[in-house]
Image (spheres, rainbow, N blue to C red):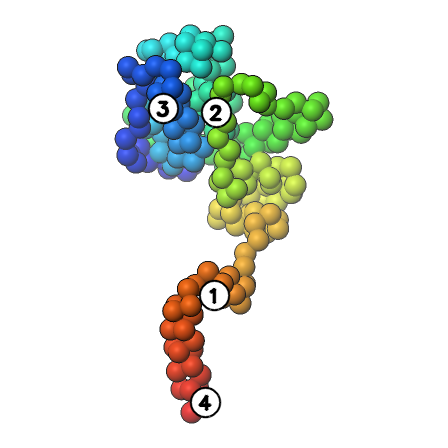
Amino acid sequence: MATVTVDSGELPSAKGKEGYELNRVLQHWGMIADGRFEYDCRALLQMIDEVDELRLWEYAHGGLYKTRDEFLEKAVLIDFDLTESSLNKIVGRLRGGEKFGLSRKEEVAQARVNAEQAKLNEESGKKINPSSNTTRVKDSPGSRSRLLRALARRAPEVLKRYECDEFTSVRAAAIAAGIVKVKTPLEQLDFWWAKASQDQQRIFAEKLKSVLNLVSY
């Protein structure tokens, strides 16, 4: 079971916010839900509590959402990949003071559900309505949830090996599957040389020259 910490900085509150200010808060929540909850669920409880206390689904985004769960899924936890039952389980354990993260089997099961749903969406041509006033925040390319989804769709056999603890991390499994490309040391040198300023390149070249002179002796 992965351990989840519960403290990583303040989350903006929706209390007293309306209109544009409220939508900005919700956008910020969505960005945090994308990456932080794999490691820190304190913010999750604040979000859930404020949604329930303020009944945000009734007026946020112009009252676009009919139910609390629809609001959580589409306006708050936009790219945080959890089923309703998994979310309720985490919230329940957190309320009991327990540090909690999904087990590998739960992570993998969730990834398979999400990958299948994405496939169905593609086949049906389902798209996000561009006229919606919901701000959708994409999960980052290297995020844990995105790598798990990619493994489920492109390398299910490697995902199964990850589930059986053959890899120390999702990233290691993604590297084995060829989903994450790791630069060689030479490629790293080329990359950072191009990024360096002329002064930095000169200093490095002088250091390299000194090293080569030592080796030649």
Three-letter code, disc 2: Thr
Give me the C-alpha separation between circle 1 and circle 4.
24 Å
Q: Which residue is mark 3?
A: 25
Of discs 3 and 4, which sits in the foreground? 3
Of discs 4 and 2, which sits in the foreground? 2
The percent coordinates of residue 211 (x first, y second) are 41, 81
Three-letter code, disc 1: Trp
Three-letter code, disc 3: Val
Residue plotted at (49% across, 46% down): 169
Q: Is residue 93 left or right of residue 158?
A: left
Three-letter code, disc 4: Ser
Instruction: Count residues near mark 3 (Cα–Cα under 10 Å), then give few for <14, some for 14-19, many for 20+.
Output: some
Instruction: Count residues near mark 4 (Cα–Cα under 10 Å), then give few for <14, some for 14-19, many for 20+.
Output: few
Residue plotted at (41% across, 38% down): 2
Q: Which circle's residue, 1 or 2, is located before the other in the chain?
A: 2
The percent coordinates of residue 182 (x first, y second) are 54, 56
Residue at the right extreme? 123
Residue plotted at (34% across, 27% down): 43
Q: Which residue is mark 1?
A: 193
Q: Which circle's residue, 1 or 4, is located before the other in the chain?
A: 1
Q: Which residue is mark 2?
A: 135
Q: Which circle's residue, 3 or 4, is located before the other in the chain?
A: 3
Quarter of the image for residue 16 reads top left
Instruction: Find out whether the residues at labels 4 and 2 contact each other: C-beta distance under 8 Å.
Output: no
Q: Which circle's residue, 1 or 3, is located before the other in the chain?
A: 3
What label sits on residue 216 in the rendered view?
A: 4
The percent coordinates of residue 179 (x first, y second) are 60, 47
Q: The residue tagged with tag 4: helix, strand or loop?
A: helix
